[in-house]
Amino acid sequence: MTHRGRAWRRLQRRKHGSHTSKPAPRACWQEKSWRLLYFRSAKFKRAQQLGRFWPHREWETVLKDAEPIRVLFICSKNQWRSPTAEQVFRREPGLDVRSAGTARSARRTVSISDIRWADIILVMEDKHRARLRAQFRDELRYKRFHSLDIPDLYRYMDPDLIELLKDKASPLIWAA
């Protein structure tokens, strides 16, 4: 009696269509994908009627937009202008606010972690912008970075300073 190996048995199964082998893959994959596409479009239409977001990708964009905007205010010594801005905008919903100074003698000096944390950086004068660019050039490359042009003439929580900050900073913060 001759010994027949696996290769011979496989060949015989292919010829005669034995039931012991795996079934042939279905040719209905196209129908299934069309059926799923129909269900997706029906769900999407129903979600639109209800005013909800569907599918999950749209939820991700909505949740990303729901994160607070992180704003960093910078002046020289972090004594009058930037702490005032921090206090004024701290109460705004949808904002997360910090303040810092560029001088070594500042109450809180700006650090690389502050720059990385911020979505928007608002400096009080152009000299602050130049100092930041000199210190943190690479970190500032892709940041929104604006100068408010507010001179160092105001005290902490001065009503004129508050009005100036609201007029100049609000459009920059809420601009898309």
Image: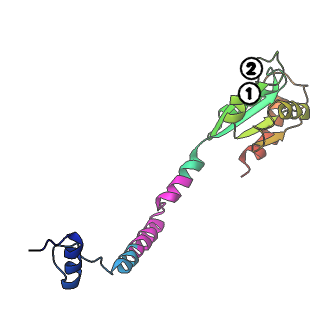
The majority secondary structure of the magenta stretch comes to helix
The N terminus - image quarter: bottom left
Circle 1 crowding by C-alpha within 10 Å: few under 14, some 14–19, many from 20? many
Left or right? Give the position of 151 relative to 157: right
Name the secondary structure under disc 1. strand
> Residue visible at 78% across and 43% down?
141
Q: Is 50 one of the magenta-colored residues?
A: yes
> Residue visible at 21% across and 75% down?
8
Q: Position of residue 149 (x, y in %)?
A: 89, 36
Label 2 sits on residue: 108
Q: Is 170 one of the magenta-colored residues?
A: no
Identify whether 57 is placed above or below 2: above
Q: Position of residue 15 (x, y in %)?
A: 22, 84
Q: Where is residue 117 in the image (x, y as percent from the top left)?
A: 67, 34
Q: Where is residue 176 in the image (x, y as percent from the top left)?
A: 71, 52
Label 1 sits on residue: 99
Whether the residues at callouts 2 and 1 have beta carbons within 8 Å, the answer is yes
> Residue visible at 82% across and 17% down?
104
Query: Residue 65 shows which numbered tag?
Result: none
The span shown in magenta is 37-61
> Residue visible at 75% across and 43% down?
143
Left or right? Give the position of 103 relative to 98: right
Circle 2 crowding by C-alpha within 10 Å: few under 14, some 14–19, many from 20? some
What is the quadrant of residue 18 in the picture?
A: bottom left
| Distance Cα–Cα, label 2 vs label 1 | 8 Å
168 or 121: nearer the viewer: 121
